[in-house]
Image: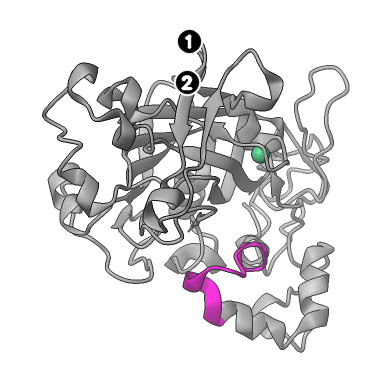
């Protein structure tokens, strides 16, 4: 059990620049103290009723960026097989002077490993360009969060290339079976063609707690650099105030995967990059070296699973795993049972309105 209302508020704060939450951001701007309270992790007072908690409410741990502690992997990065030249698409679009450079894994300042996507700096990960083969449109990035968490949102920030065009954001508990969280497409028609579901047009919205939507909202060509993809897994879902079991199951994950399938290209270049031709010798290098993925940051907002019975989950000094600091007379790794001698009532999770303390 997690306090998704705080997660939703934090997501709004982190997403302030994005159109999808623009109205919510304006809403928050009228309440600067409440914004600060949320940032500080304090519960909000009664005058702000949506986020106000009852005195007897459950306890919840902080939402933090799980990606900073993750083990990250990409199945291809530029410069891995020696120096590789590339050019920025922005030069081509705005008729600027050529802006070309080289990737080289052996030179620190020219290397773009996937670790750059979670390093907290503006350094970025970059994929091999299509000049190294059209198969480089298909790239998989996997993050192992190293234990189960409830994930509230995922934010992907692009660097010197447009945002990915068509791709899938996925989750897994075991790194074997992956389920989709959200589909992203270059144009709405691709939702049916690639993923077998109709597109959700405009700002993403949800009918159920575990609905997987398909959207072209975050795959626009503009901005051509430094674009962002903000995916909230809880905002706008009906079970957020419970939160419902369905939403808790939907957001639970240890592994997060980005399965990139198609670059966002200029329409004019589609004529040149024929996806039916798959031999590098027949690809126009001056065009294809402009097409690659470049991601400077992946943030995954989430919290420990303590079922509403812990405020903190400090790191275990031996294993490095985060452990719930269980209260309310609860025990177990996730405060998921009443401690011995406190079994007068059956265990229940803490909620946004009831603490459900185990009684002795
Ligand atoms: Ca970075």
Q: Do labels 2 and 1 touch, CB within 8 Å?
A: yes
Q: Is residue 187 above or below residue 269?
A: below
Quarter of the image for residue 333 reads: top right
* Mark 1 burial class by Cα count in 10 Å: few <14, some 14-19, many 20+: few
* Mark 2 burial class by Cα count in 10 Å: few <14, some 14-19, many 20+: some
Residue 183: x and y, percent? 32, 48
From mark 2 to mark 1, how far is it between C-alphas? 8 Å
Going by the image, does 272 lie left or right of 135? left
Give the SS element for disc 1: loop
Q: Which residue is mark 1?
A: 81
* Residue 39 sits inside the magenta stretch: no
Of helix, strand and loop, which mostly describes the magenta segment? helix
Instruction: Give residue 84's mark.
Output: 2
Q: Nearer the viewer, residue 230 or 343?
A: 230
Report the magenta residues as a range. Answer: 10-23
Q: Regarding ligand 1, which quadrant of the image does it lie in?
A: top right
């Amino acid at each position: 059990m997690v306090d998704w209302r705080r997660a939703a508020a934090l997501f709004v704060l982190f997403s302030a620049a994005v159109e999808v939450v623009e109205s919510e951001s304006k809403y928050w701007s009228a309440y600067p103290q409440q914004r600060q309270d949320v940032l500080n992790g304090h519960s909000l007072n009664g005058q702000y009723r949506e986020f106000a908690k009852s005195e007897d409410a459950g306890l919840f741990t902080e939402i933090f960026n799980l990606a900073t502690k993750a083990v990250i992997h990409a199945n291809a990065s530029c410069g891995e097989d020696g120096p590789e030249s590339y050019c920025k698409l922005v030069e081509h679009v705005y008729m600027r002077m050529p802006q070309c450079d080289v990737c080289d894994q052996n030179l620190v300042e020219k290397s773009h490993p996937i670790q750059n996507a979670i390093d907290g700096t503006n350094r970025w990960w970059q994929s091999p360009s299509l000049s190294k083969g059209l198969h480089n449109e298909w790239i998989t990035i996997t993050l192992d969060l190293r234990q189960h968490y409830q994930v509230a949102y995922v934010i992907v920030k692009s660097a010197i290339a447009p945002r990915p065009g068509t791709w899938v954001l996925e989750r897994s508990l075991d790194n074997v079976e992956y389920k989709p969280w959200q589909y992203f497409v270059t144009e709405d028609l691709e939702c049916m063609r690639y993923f077998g579901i109709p597109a959700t047009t405009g700002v993403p919205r949800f009918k159920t707690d575990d609905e997987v939507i398909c959207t072209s909202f975050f795959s626009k060509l503009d901005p051509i650099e430094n674009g962002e993809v903000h995916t909230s897994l809880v905002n706008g879902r009906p079970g957020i105030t419970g939160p419902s079991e369905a939403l808790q199951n939907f957001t639970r994950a240890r592994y997060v995967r980005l399965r990139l399938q198609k670059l966002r290209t200029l329409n004019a270049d589609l004529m040149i990059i024929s996806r039916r031709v798959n031999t590098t010798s027949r690809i126009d290098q001056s065009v294809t070296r402009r097409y690659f993925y470049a991601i400077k940051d992946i943030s995954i907002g989430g919290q420990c699973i303590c079922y509403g019975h812990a405020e903190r989950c400090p790191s275990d000094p031996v294993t490095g795993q985060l452990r719930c600091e269980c209260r309310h007379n609860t025990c177990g790794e996730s405060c998921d049972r009443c401690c011995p001698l406190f079994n007068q009532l059956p265990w229940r999770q803490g909620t946004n309105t009831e603490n459900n303390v185990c009684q002795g």
